[in-house]
């Protein structure tokens, strides 16, 4: 039987900075049982809420639009896009880089923050890991369909084929195949590994044979024995160590698609760190965008608390300033290099035909995050949610500006042009959001969206023995009474 520890009303706001006590990560009068009930209650709901069905129908419809546009592209050709020389890379590459970046927060929250023993990650890591998988699925579509001959996309893989032809290992497209494939594999293993104890909980609570069988298969015979926990923790640690380099390597490899070219504005060594900072920036923004409505709809405010949201807003502030520094550094490099083509490219970005896109990018990515300096704003749910959406908009425009502005104004003025996306471009991009949300809604409905085992590990109840011996709260510094309850 779990021990309930009443928490004073002061703990309902766990964003206070009191050096004498550590704020709890789970607020309210919660114990192990209540956390299990709150998380398991979502996939165990006897009837799916109408709001979920409405959102799922809309998302599934947009997914249908995506595959209809892909079918139209395959049967007709890439001419259905707005691509015209000199802009041979359009929204397909923009969307690919955008979706790959979205997934980076999942790996950072799961792996790096785990290795750094950041306990606040426990309530949101499952969200972020799931988001990573779904974003990589969306990203993986675009390299396959933008090559034109989709039916021979398997040539990208380093496997023998009927023409005795091997991929060009100097091609950035092949680098993307390896980067995204590795990232998807490790992220999927990490996501699934962390869910095994929680899937076993759903199995043990199952009231139908079908649910018991499915969750039983997925939980791999988990019995919560000491040996199982030992193997699990070691495997989880190794996967975290393996996934950590991916945060830096994957988007660095994607940035090489541009950096290895000789196009003005692309051929620069700042792209790898610049892209990684932007990816983490946009990834955390997407986590916040998804978490805020989900925690409200499923009443998880006491598990996914203001402190979690505030911590993410601080990371967005830090990475947003890194992105702003990268923007200014690009202009400095273009001026200091003395290269007239580079100087023109960046002046063209700021004051040329795509200036409107550039200033949307700067406003959303540099100015909007500055509101997070103020605690009242970064802990205001509505302000934080709106800011996260604007950041996602700004990061998409960043990719658009990088790809299109450089290609539309290259070395020869005689080949300059103005790129306009077609309706197929637009509907394909909108449809990718439908696929992303469809996968996310299925995840929310049928799988534990919060890591119960990890959340319980950072609750005061998990440290009662140590607290009783030490004479003070190991977790939030409160003195215990003789009955083991927190004394406010």
Image (cartoon, rainbow, N blue to C red):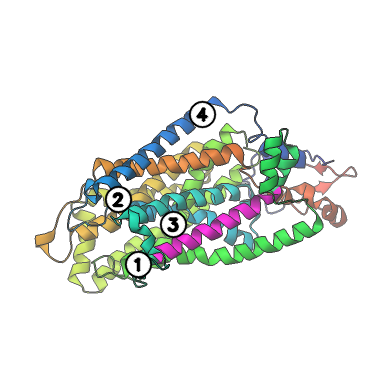
Q: Identify the secondary structure beneath mark 4.
A: helix
The answer to which of marks 3 and 2 sits earlier in the sequence is 2
3D distance between C-alphas at marks 3 and 1: 19 Å
Give the side of residue 200 with respect to residue 261, left or right.
right
Q: Is residue 280 magenta?
A: no
Q: Which residue is mark 1?
A: 172
CB within 8 Å, label 3 to label 2:
no
Q: In the image, which disc is placed on residue 53?
A: 4
Give the side of residue 107 with respect to residue 415, left or right.
right
3D distance between C-alphas at marks 4 and 3: 31 Å
**3 or 2: mark nearer the eye:** 2
Please rate how many residues cluster around mark 1, counting C-alpha atoms within 10 Å: few if below 14, some from 14 to 19, many from 20: some
The answer to which of marks 3 and 1 sits earlier in the sequence is 1
The answer to which of marks 2 and 4 sits earlier in the sequence is 4
User: x, y (%) of residue 222?
Assistant: 74, 51
Q: Which residue is mark 2?
A: 91
Which is more toward the observer, 315 or 268?
A: 268
User: x, y (%) of residue 124?
Assistant: 59, 48
Q: Which residue is mark 3?
A: 279
Please rate how many residues cluster around mark 4, counting C-alpha atoms within 10 Å: few if below 14, some from 14 to 19, many from 20: few
Which is more toward the observer, 296 or 131?
A: 131
**Quadrant the C terminus occupies:** top right
The answer to which of marks 2 and 1 sits earlier in the sequence is 2
Please rate how many residues cluster around mark 2, counting C-alpha atoms within 10 Å: few if below 14, some from 14 to 19, many from 20: many
């Amino acid at each position: 039987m779990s021990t309930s520890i009443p928490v004073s009303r002061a703990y309902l706001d766990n964003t206070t900075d009191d050096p004498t006590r550590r704020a709890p990560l789970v607020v309210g009068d919660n114990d192990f049982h209540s956390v299990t009930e709150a998380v398991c209650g979502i996939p165990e709901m006897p009837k799916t809420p109408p709001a979920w069905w409405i959102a799922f129908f809309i998302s599934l419809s947009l997914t249908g639009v995506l595959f209809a546009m892909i079918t139209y592209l395959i049967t007709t050709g890439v001419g259905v896009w707005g691509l015209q020389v000199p802009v041979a890379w359009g929204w397909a590459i923009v969307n690919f880089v955008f979706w790959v970046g979205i997934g980076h927060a999942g790996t950072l929250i799961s792996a790096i923050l785990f290795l750094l023993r950041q306990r606040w990650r426990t309530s949101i890591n499952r969200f972020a890991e799931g988001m990573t998988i779904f974003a990589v699925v969306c990203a993986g579509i675009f390299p396959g369909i933008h090559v034109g001959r989709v039916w021979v996309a398997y040539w990208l893989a380093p496997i023998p084929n009927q023409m005795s032809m091997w991929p060009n290992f100097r091609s950035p497209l092949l680098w993307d195949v390896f980067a995204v494939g590795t990232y998807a594999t490790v992220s999927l293993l990490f996501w699934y590994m962390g869910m095994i104890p929680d899937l076993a909980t759903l199995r043990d609570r199952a009231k139908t044979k079908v649910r018991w069988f499915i969750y039983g298969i997925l939980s791999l015979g988990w019995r919560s024995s000491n040996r199982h926990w030992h193997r699990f923790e070691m495997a989880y640690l190794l996967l975290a160590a393996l996934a950590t380099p991916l945060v830096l390597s994957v988007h660095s490899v994607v940035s090489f698609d541009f950096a290895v070219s000789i196009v003005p504005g692309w051929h620069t060594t700042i792209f790898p760190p610049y892209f990684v900072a932007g990816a983490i920036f946009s990834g955390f923004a997407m986590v916040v965008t998804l978490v805020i409505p989900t925690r409200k709809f499923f009443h998880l405010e006491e598990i996914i608390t203001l402190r979690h949201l505030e911590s993410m807003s601080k990371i967005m502030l830090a990475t947003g300033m890194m992105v702003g520094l990268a923007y200014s550094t690009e202009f400095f490099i273009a001026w200091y290099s003395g290269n007239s083509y580079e100087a023109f490219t960046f002046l063209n970005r700021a004051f040329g035909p795509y200036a409107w896109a550039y200033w949307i990018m700067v406003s959303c990515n540099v100015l909007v995050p500055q509101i997070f300096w103020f605690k009242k704003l970064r802990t205001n749910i509505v302000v934080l949610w709106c800011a996260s959406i604007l950041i996602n908009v700004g990061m998409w425009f960043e990719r658009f500006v990088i790809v299109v502005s450089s290609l539309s104004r290259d070395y020869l003025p005689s080949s300059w042009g103005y790129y306009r996306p077609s309706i197929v471009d637009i509907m394909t991009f909108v449809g990718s959001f439908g696929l992303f949300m469809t996968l996310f809604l299925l995840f929310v409905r049928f799988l534990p969206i919060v890591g119960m085992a990890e959340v319980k590990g950072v609750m005061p109840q998990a440290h009662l023995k140590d607290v009783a011996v030490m004479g003070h709260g190991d977790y939030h510094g409160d003195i215990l009474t003789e009955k083991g309850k927190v004394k406010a």
